[in-house]
Amino acid sequence: MLVQSANFVISNTEVSKCPKENLPEYAFIGRSNVGKSSLINILCNKKNLAKTSSRPGKTQLINHFLINDNWHLVDLPGFGYARVSKTKKKIFQKFITNYFKQRKQLVSAFLLIDIRHEPQPIDLNFMRWLGENHIPFSIIFTKSDKLKPRVIERNIKEYSEKMLENHWEEMPQTFITSSLHKTGGEEVLKYIYFLNESFLEK
Ligand code: GDP
């Protein structure tokens, strides 16, 4: 059992109001409907920890969860949802960018990407922004149950080619998950625990 306890701590839009403890922290982010809430629930082994949304774009806050009393999982708002007005979108971007730039406890971000889709500019641009700001990140491909292994391999290859084109020297750490089949989550957690150790050694 990799997660013994998972509890909601606080939701807000200001970095200054995020938990003060110096615990390692991992932020989950992706386009609305990518399967972020479902994955967080699978990782934490709780049905409704993160709300799975019938209406995408609903969770517009920085949500902190305390895991095993020694690290934070952060559920960030989904981006790229068309029904959010332009001004509102800007505000989200501001507090999301503030979070990434200011949050000292952040060890790594996890960018969730629906494995079915070809590389999207919004994800590639976000990765570039993370890179420019020296924010470590990994990619979690979601909904792998929807494709055959051969197609998964092809789509990931397409991603790595696009990233190389976008001046990345190598692909970041990647994970392939399915919340429906409950696969891939354990690898994500093992990676988090591996990173936690280096955070604690610092
Ligand atoms: P969020 O908006 O990123 O939090 O996405 P949700 O977790 O709410 O999921 C959006 C939709 O995708 C829901 O209808 C989920 O049931 C579905 N979904 C999420 N993960 C998976 C998955 O791994 N496999 C399949 N087949 N569907 C998924």
Image: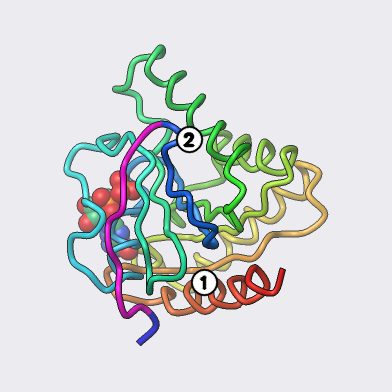
The boundaries of the magenta stretch are 3-13
Residue 4's spot in the image, x, y percent? 32, 80
Residue 80's spot in the image, x, y percent? 42, 31
Q: Which residue is mark 2?
A: 16
Left or right relative to 150: residue 182: left
Q: Which residue is mark 1?
A: 150
| Residue in the foreground of this view, choosing between 116 and 11 | 11
Left or right relative to 138: residue 141: left
Q: Tell which tag, 2 or 1, sits nearer the viewer.
A: 2
Residue 96's spot in the image, x, y percent? 50, 34
Above or below, 173 against 28 in this view is below
Q: Quadrant of ligand 1?
A: bottom left
For the point 52% across and 71% down, the residue is: 150
Say whether marks 2 and 1 touch (CB < 8 Å).
no
Left or right relative to 104: residue 99: left
Asked whether mark 1 lies closer than 8 Å to ligand 1, one says no
Q: Which image quadrant for residue 2?
A: bottom left
How packed mark 1 is, by other alpha carbons closer than 10 Å (few <14, some 14-19, many 20 or more), is: few
Q: Is residue 4 magenta?
A: yes
